[in-house]
Image: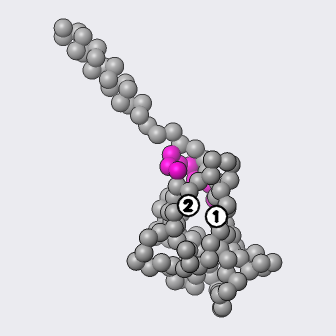
Amino acid sequence: MKTKTILLALVLSLFLTNCVQKTEQKTVIFTLDASEMKNVKKVAIRGKDKPFSWGEATEMKLNANNNSYQITTTFVTGYKFTEVKFVVNDSLEFENEDNRRVIFSEKDTTHYKAKFNKR
């Protein structure tokens, strides 16, 4: 009886340690339309998951052809989404409101397009 209990506990512990969520690489192209904005000096993004963070903004690059800002990044995650906010001239959008939720595509790349402070 004691042997069966130990064996059962061992098998159960093996199952519990293998419950780790599988991670995948998820590439996202973030595009912020700034065509309606005046005097834009700096555009960045903050987020919940690495390589982003809430504490430090990651700068986005200007596409002068259509006055948009863009950044491409890859997340290594087991989640189906991430959360972000854009920063323009050091002003964080949606202050004291919910973050933007970016749902990862099942395909290779997710394209996320937005306008500052607009849902």
Residue beneath label 2, please? Answer: 102
Q: What is the three-letter code of the residue carrying label 2?
A: Val
Residue extending furthest toward the front? 119
Instruction: Name the residue rendered at 34%, 19% in the picture.
Output: 11
Left or right placement of residue 63 versus residue 48 in this view: right
Location of residue 88 by image quarter: bottom right
Instruction: Name the residue rendered at 43%, 37% in the picture.
Output: 20
Q: Quadrant of the C terminus?
A: bottom right
- Mark 1 touches mark 2? (CB < 8 Å): yes
Residue extending furthest toward the bottom? 39
Q: Position of residue 41 (x, y in %)?
A: 64, 86
Q: Position of residue 115 (x, y in %)?
A: 62, 77
Instruction: Name the residue rendered at 24%, 15% in the picture.
Output: 6
Mark 1 or mark 2: which comes first in sequence? 2
Left or right placement of residue 52 versus residue 63 in this view: left
Instruction: Name the residue rendered at 38%, 31% in the picture.
Output: 17
The 10 Å Cα crowd at callout 2, few under 14, some 14 to 19, many 20 or more, is some
Q: What is the three-letter code of the residue carrying label 1?
A: Tyr
Left or right placement of residue 10 versus residue 64 in this view: left
| Residue stretch in magenta | 72-80
Estimate the spatial distance between the alpha carbons at disc 1 and disc 2, rounded to whole Å. Answer: 7 Å
**Element under label 1?**
strand
Residue beneath label 1, please? Answer: 112
Question: In this figure, which colouring scheme has been used for the structure?
Answer: one colour
Which labelled disc corresponds to residue 5? none
In the image, is residue 89 above or below residue 55? below
